[in-house]
Amino acid sequence: MIEAVLFDLSGVLYTGTEPIPGAVESIQKLNKAGLPIRYITNTTRSPRGKILKRLQSMGFAIHEDQLLTAPVAARHYLIEKGLSPFLLIHPDLKVEFADLESNNSNAVLVGDAGSAFTYEHMNQAFRLLVEGVPLIAMGKNRYFREQDGLSLDAGPFVVALEYAAETEAILIGKPSPEFFRAALESIHAKAENTIMVGDDVEADVIGALDAGLQGILVRTGKYRSGDEKKIEGRAVCLDDINTVVEWILDQKTN
Amino acid sequence: MIEAVLFDLSGVLYTGTEPIPGAVESIQKLNKAGLPIRYITNTTRSPRGKILKRLQSMGFAIHEDQLLTAPVAARHYLIEKGLSPFLLIHPDLKVEFADLESNNSNAVLVGDAGSAFTYEHMNQAFRLLVEGVPLIAMGKNRYFREQDGLSLDAGPFVVALEYAAETEAILIGKPSPEFFRAALESIHAKAENTIMVGDDVEADVIGALDAGLQGILVRTGKYRSGDEKKIEGRAVCLDDINTVVEWILDQKTN
């Protein structure tokens, strides 16, 4: 039984600025079938509003309430814990956290900072971490696909700081079970009846499986040959979002 | 029985540009006692000649043949294997590898690149690694001490690339057993009769112990309270190089 579907964004619905061919129509089909959908992303290069606009401009019929992002979850976490972060994040995302900054950082927040991952910024973060402040990571993804090839995501830089300061990051976003749970709660769906669809075998698929959901890996985006071996016997691997939607609608009618 | 001594440089003989007080005289004492000494370093911010000049200008009586560096060992390795490296290293060190570069990199060489650890350079290295070229690391040290505090060494960036490309670096330099062995061979000393003195509990002391040498940890340089717990029962921890030299001369006369 399938009562809800969660989609990752980059590499599943689009690559770079281009929708995966057929993806807009496939999402429409799924909407017509009445299945609740949430879009959950670790993307930390843009604020939520900008991601939403970009999706809508590509033609995707996605409502604001359907989009859950790691930065929004991180903001909740920081406020709840009363933390004022040093921001090792993309300049475009700073607006979402600017009001939480102070001269006395008592946390380090890491996202996919891109070119802002300079040695100087990494060293500033490291010096705070050796003083004992917590490291908060919006995802630990290894890489993502850009139009000209694979590029480093936040994960490698999180791991670098963990190693340097001999600490372990608090993970916000996928594959954190709390993040999947928040998505399920927002649609009142049971984990075992919900499918997570992603191109990241670890953060999306294994993360979902470990949180009790079903998972489907797609062969688009950052998918690399052999990734499916990591989920053998636990989840299926399908060509792209179009095949996934057919598969889901088939399951529902059978 | 002690027949030879190996010293790490930064944090043991000097911090930043300043010798540890008394260090010049302590090395003189050890030289007078006739013990063979080698200086072995993972420092990769300067070519060997420049390190030697810096040591001599601080007053240390050190001969060229006594200095073993990770870059020199890396150069040997690259030539032996016929590798043409993409250089993720400090600009000052490039002169030592420039003749090995080509348009078709078939290896990635990482040192303490400092500010040259940009996102763009890391991404270039990553894209080669996912194609399957080997990752060669001149040390995996976590950090070192500068005059204004601890700073990130090459290790965290090596670990970042290992994680991103799901690969394991070939380690040249400490704590690689080959590096300790090369030092021992140059003085015809037995591992069990040789003491390695360092401020890096992992690369220097545990590395030496694992290679069959004796080890002494000093409480200068990057030493942090609690480091000695990692070598409890296997090696001693002494205040600084002066105490170490007294300790060694004591052992020799007893």
Image (spheres, coloured by chain):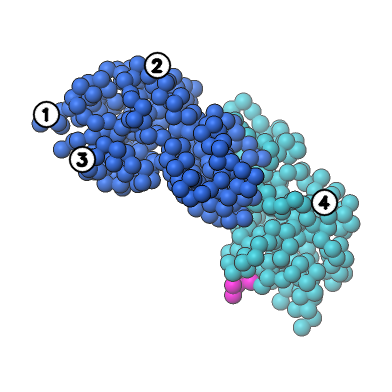
Chain colours: A blue, B cyan
Q: Secondary structure at mark 4?
A: loop
Do the residues at discs 3 and 2 belong to one chain?
yes
| Structural distance between the alpha carbons of marks 3 and 4 | 64 Å
Residue at the disc numbered 3:
A193
Residue B44 drawn at (x, y percent): 71, 45
Q: For the N terminus of chain B, give its image quadrant.
A: bottom right
The verdict on a common chain for dots 4 and 1 is: no
Q: Quadrant of the C terminus of chain B?
A: bottom right
Question: Which of pointers 3 and 2 indicates the residue nearer the eye?
Answer: 2
The stretch of residues the image draws in magenta is: B231-235
Measured from the top left, where is residue A15 in percent x and y?
Answer: 41, 23
**Residue that numbered label 1 is attached to:** A253
Crowding around mark 4 (Cα neighbors within 10 Å: few <14, some 14 to 19, many 20+) is few
Q: Specify few, some or many for label 1: CA neighbours under 10 Å numbering under 14, 14-19, or 20 or more.
A: few
* Mark 3 or mark 4, whichever is nearer to me: 3
Q: Quadrant of residue A248?
A: top left
Instruction: Identify the element where label 2 is drawn.
Output: helix
Question: Is residue A9 something one can see in this rendering?
Answer: yes
Q: Is residue A59 above or below residue B193?
A: above
Which of the marked residues, 1 or 2, is nearer the chain's N terminus?
A: 2
Mark 3–mark 2 Cα distance, whole angstroms, equals 31 Å
User: In this orientation, which residue lies closer to the viewer: B143 or A17?
Assistant: A17
